[in-house]
Each structure stands twice: as C-alpha cells, then as structure tokens.
Amino acid sequence: MAGHHNILIIGGGTAGITVAAQLKLKDRSLDVAIIEPSEAHYYQPAWTLVGAGTFDQESTRKPEADYIPKGVTWIKERVASITASDNKVRLESGEDVTYDYLVVAAGIQIDWAKVKGLPEALGKGGVCSNYLYEQAPYTWEVLKSLKAGDKAFFTQPNTPIKCGGAPQKIMWLTADHLRQNGLQGKVDVEMMSPGTMLFGVEVFRNALLKVQARYGAKWSHHTNLVEIRGDKNEAVFDLLDPETGAVTGQRVERYNMIHIVPPQSAPDFIKQSDVANAEGWVEVDKNTLQHTRFANVFSLGDSAGTPNAKTGAAVRKQAPIMVANLLRVMKENKLTDDKRYHGYTSCPLTTGYGEMLLAEFDYDNNPDPSLPIDTTKPRWSMWILKKYILPTLYWKGMLRGRA
Ligand SMILES: Cc1cc2nc3c(=O)[nH]c(=O)nc-3n(C[C@H](O)[C@H](O)[C@H](O)COP(=O)(O)OP(=O)(O)OC[C@H]3O[C@@H](n4cnc5c(N)ncnc54)[C@H](O)[C@@H]3O)c2cc1C
C-alpha cells in the first residue's frame, strides 16, 4: 500500500499543479499528493511557436520538481486504474493509494496509431506535428524547406483535441512565412478537416475567413486523415458525407509537408474506470466540476467530461471554481453557492508572424472577452501577449496558484 492522502490529484500537468498550488495557498495544513510520472513539466501552448521557428524549444520544458508545491507529496508513478467506489487508485507498480477526495487531471491521450503508418512516418519525410515536445522543432525544419511547386497539408482529426485552434495556427504561420519569402501562391497550402466550418464562433470565423483569403489558403471540409504512406510521401483521407459523416470515398495526396494534429481521446485508464462517462471522460457536472455519482471526486482540464474547448486557458478559469467547491464539500459537505464554470475558454490564434486574434468564448459559443480591447481582429499586442506575457504568467503565476 503506497499510502492514504486526504486529497489525491492524478496528473501534475497544467491542471494538477495549479489546483495543488491553490489548495496549499488556501490551507498549508492540507494533506495533498500528486501522482505524476514525468520528470518534466511542459508549456504546451508555445509548441506552435516552436514549430514556427520563433520560440526556444528548451524554455517550454522545466523540471516538474520545481513546480510541485511545497508540502505536497509527489508520487512519481503512473496510475493504472481508479476504483472510485472504493476510494482507491492503483499504480502501475501494483501498489494502491487511497484517498478521501480525488481530483482527476490526467490530460488527454494522443492516439498516434489511429492513423495507419503515422507512428513510423512521424518526424521524417515532411511528416510533422507540434503535439510533441520532441517533434515541434521538426515542423520548422520542414516549413522553412518548402519551395515553389510544393504542397503543404494541415490536418485536424475527427476527435476532440486539446487546443482546437492549433491545427490552423501553424497553417497561418506557414502561409505567412511563404508570403514573406515570395512563395505565396507558389506553394499549395491546404487544411484537411472533418468539420463543417473554419471556426465555431461566428465573429472569429468571419475574421479568420479574411485571413484565409489574404493567404489564398484552401480549406477542405469533411475530410479525415486515415493513413500516411511515408515511403511514397502520400496521405490518404476519407471523404465524409456532410449530413451523416459516413465515408463516401477517399482522396490520396502527395505532400512535401504535412502537419498532423493526431486523434485524441480520454486516457485509457479513465475510460476503463468507474468515473468515466459514455465517451470515456470523467463524468462531472459541467458547472461545478464535481463528479455526478461520486461526491468526493472532481475533475478539470482535458480529462474532464465538460463540453468546453480543451485549453490551458479553460483550466485557469476552472481551477479556482473547482478548488472552492472541493474545500466547501470537505468542510460542510455541500457545494458553494456562487462558484460555477460557464465554459470559458480562449484560443490564441496566431494569424501570422507578429499578429494574433484572441478567441474567448463560453459553452454556448458566445464571445466572452476578458480584455478591454477588440480581440476579434488580428493584433500585434496579442502576439506579444502570446509570445512573452502568457508564458511568464504560466510559470510564475498560474502554476504557483496566483493567476
Ligand atoms: C500544440 C499545442 C498547442 C496548444 N496551445 C494552447 C494555447 O494556445 N492556449 C491554451 O490555453 N492551451 C493550449 N494548449 C492546450 C493545453 O496545453 C492543455 O489544454 C492543458 O495543458 C491541459 O491541462 P491538463 O492538466 O488537463 O493536461 P496536461 O497539462 O497535459 O497534464 C496532464 C498530466 O497528466 C499526466 N498523466 C497522464 N497519464 C497519467 C497517468 N496514467 N498517471 C498519472 N499521471 C498521468 C501527464 O504526464 C501530464 O503531466 C495547446 C496544446 C498543444 C499540444
């Protein structure tokens, strides 16, 4: 038995560390433990900029040990299963940890193998992805080697993903790089997406359509990447019926660059546990973040079964609400009256080098601005926010429980 903790947090990523830090700021005496196998903590939002050659890869990774809050126990292991009916978590080592309260913050699982041939092809021959720390610099290698006559594809899977804007952010940056190097119109730039529209929120969609027109980029809806033939530089896409989503045929394309956003899903150990909903995510109330069947279980971030766009910005709004509700449940066995999450998320859409549009919206796709300026237009100030201010806010504020 690896022990018992009053509050046990699974995952020491964005959500896990933020929650642990906020709990300890509220009450130093709390017994909190984090289960996290990784020695490193990553600032994933900057990987888009790494892939575009405008951010230092190494500065997106810092030792996890530096961010485990003082007084919090770090269990450096991977969780194998959760049995909430027994208040128990099993580690991959076979040991059990029991808890009074559980916070599930294990992120999202990347399913590379769901695209045939992708695991073997990734990282060579023009097949790149910003979804891994190790891979993001290769995107830049491929991007800067594009030449007249080449074809560059960008993909989006038919699953939920973290950072819904990431597929197109790197496309706009690539298009801008080509423009700056006299290659606009000479390299084909095309998004292959299973969706029906460029962005779900109208006001931002309209702005992004102007960006698309500016670069002359193509956007193919109702397409889904299913295979990479790395030896032939070919990508195979299913063509989907717009009404039913049924596969109606296939399109095979030769690529010089293909930036892949891989299929993603809830971590397998959550899918197989009693805290999961039908889709495999942790079944929490979308406003209180408390589990709908186990009152001592909470979840936030990418693992949570909340219908918001999965981002670190969403975690920033969720964490104080979840912490307040957890503490109230611990003290008085009831939720707070006023701490509710309404789906806030934000997507910093880099539309070119030196400009960004900040899409902030809620569960109902209503714009939910937090800044006193109009962020529906690409702006230089938002680029500065993304490149310099947000990383500092993350490492120094959010992970310390202060932002
Ligand atoms: C390319 C890219 C661009 C992005 N851009 C943005 C952006 O511009 N803005 C934004 O807000 N967000 C962005 N995001 C999304 C953001 O990084 C995530 O939404 C955020 O990190 C979610 O936090 P989390 O704690 O839920 O998951 P994570 O931060 O991923 O943490 C999950 C943790 O759980 C751990 N874990 C996993 N399995 C287990 C297990 N079995 N046992 C124990 N621990 C486990 C992992 O090691 C990890 O440390 C981007 C992400 C990517 C990849």
Image (cartoon, rainbow, N blue to C red):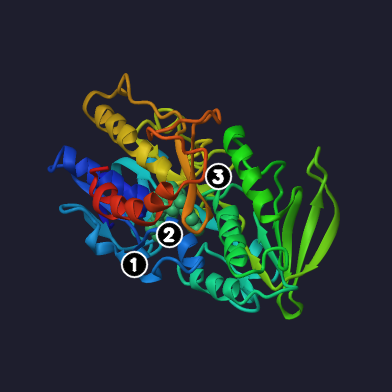
User: Ligand 1 sits in which quadrant?
Assistant: bottom left
Q: Is residue 106 above or below residue 200?
A: below
Residue position for label 3: 280
User: Which mark sits nearer the N-terminus, 2 or 3?
Assistant: 2
Dot 1 falls on a residue whose secondary structure is helix
| Callout 2–callout 1 Cβ contact below 8 Å | yes
Residue position for label 2: 46
Check the image and name the residue furthest to the right.
249
Q: Position of residue 162 (x, y in %)?
A: 52, 50
User: Which image quadrant is residue 62 in?
Assistant: bottom left
Label 1 to label 3: alpha-carbon separation? 33 Å
2 vs 3, front mark: 2
Dot 2 falls on a residue whose secondary structure is helix
1 vs 3, front mark: 1
User: Which mark sits nearer the N-terminus, 2 or 1?
Assistant: 2
Q: Amino acid at mark 2?
A: Ala
Q: Amino acid at mark 1?
A: Ser
| Callout 1–callout 3 Cβ contact below 8 Å | no
Label 2 to label 1: alpha-carbon separation? 9 Å
Q: How many numbered badges does the structure rendering display?
A: 3
Is ligand 1 less than 8 Å from the beta carbon at label 2?
yes
